[in-house]
Image (cartoon, helix red, strand yellow):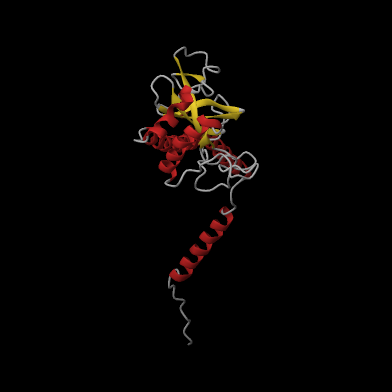
């Protein structure tokens, strides 16, 4: 009699179980991996816009302040070079420093807070300054007067003031002064040039409240004969707008 084959129950196949589980998990992940929805993208963009709007003004203020700090450092270099030249043992250079007061060259009333008295009526504490030398701080078509030149450049008084300006330039640039106002060729100004390391270009070029800056101006104070460095404009004669060194006006602090 033929024996019946007994079916042996070996239980669940572990390998098949794990393969099925893994396959099921992969299908689940594929079904869930559908990317961001439109609403989610819009929310992210809105959050980024809010953050940018909050950070941008502070970042702009920081950049502007750093540029003003660079201009103050430049003004300090100008001040120290002028201070050194004004203390020269040479009597001609000393006279060239103060000749602007004696000749009453373009006197201008300024306030103790560092503005033109014509523009700032709030400060009644004023004093008089006289321009000694000036140079462009921004490009106006070309780099006209890119190097400091004497405010007086004609006649006997101009000759005297240039003695100071030449000494001042030697201290400032460690080079010989530029000498006469013109090279001898009509219309060729010895102070003009291309933008190079001698051009003390402004870093902060915006209107801080009293006009956009155009030029550096070295003044002598009429009350104590001390130098001051201002940022101003050139319209016929130079005109002070912001005192930068010493004691910068509030717009540059």
Q: Which quadrant does the C terminus fall into?
A: top left
Q: Is residue 84 left or right of residue 99?
A: left
In the rendering, at what x and y percent does residue 164 appear? 44, 35
Does residue 182 show up?
Answer: yes
Nearest the viewer among 225 and 62 is 225
Q: Nearer the viewer, residue 127 or 18?
A: 127
Q: From what the image shows, is residue 183 above or below residue 235? A: below
Q: As drawn, is 14 to the left or to the right of 138?
A: left
209 or 149: nearer the viewer = 149
Residue under the image location 46 percent in, 27 percent down: 99
Vertically, is 246 above or below 178?
Answer: above
Residue 46, quarter of the rendered image: top right
Percent position of residue 143, x then y: 59, 42
Nearest to the observer: residue 1 or residue 219: 219
In the rendered view, tell whether residue 16 sits above or below residue 112. below
Q: Position of residue 228 (x, y in %)?
A: 43, 28
Query: Residue lying furthest bottom in this view?
Result: 1
Q: Quadrant of residue 66?
A: top left
Q: x, y (%) of residue 154?
A: 56, 32
Residue 54 appears in the picture as rendered: no
Residue for point 58% across, 45% down: 183
Rendered residue at 53%/61% (across/down): 26
Which residue sits at x=46%, y=40%?
166
Count of labels in the image: 0
């Amino acid at each position: 009699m033929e024996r019946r084959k007994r079916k042996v129950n070996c239980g669940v196949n572990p390998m098949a179980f794990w393969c099925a589980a893994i396959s099921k998990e992969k299908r689940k992940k594929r079904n869930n991996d559908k990317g961001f929805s439109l609403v989610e993208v819009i929310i992210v963009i809105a959050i980024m816009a809010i953050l940018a709007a909050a950070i941008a003004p502070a970042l702009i203020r920081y950049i502007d302040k750093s540029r003003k700090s660079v201009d103050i450092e430049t003004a300090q270099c100008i001040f120290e070079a002028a201070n050194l030249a004004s203390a020269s043992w040479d009597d001609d250079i000393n006279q060239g420093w103060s000749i602007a007061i004696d000749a009453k060259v373009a006197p201008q009333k300024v306030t103790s807070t560092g503005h033109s008295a014509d523009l700032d009526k709030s400060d009644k504490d004023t004093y008089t300054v006289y321009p000694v030398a000036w140079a462009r701080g921004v490009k106006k078509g070309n780099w006209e007067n890119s190097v400091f030149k004497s405010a007086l450049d004609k006649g006997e008084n101009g000759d005297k003031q240039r003695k100071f300006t030449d000494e001042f330039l030697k201290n400032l640039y460690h080079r010989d002064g530029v000498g006469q106002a013109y090279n001898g060729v009509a219309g060729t100004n010895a102070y003009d040039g291309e933008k190079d390391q001698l051009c003390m270009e402004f870093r902060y070029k915006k209107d801080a409240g009293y006009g956009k800056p155009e030029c550096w101006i070295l003044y002598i104070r009429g009350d104590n004969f001390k130098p001051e460095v201002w940022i101003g404009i050139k319209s016929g004669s130079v005109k002070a707008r912001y005192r930068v060194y010493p004691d910068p006006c509030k717009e540059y602090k």
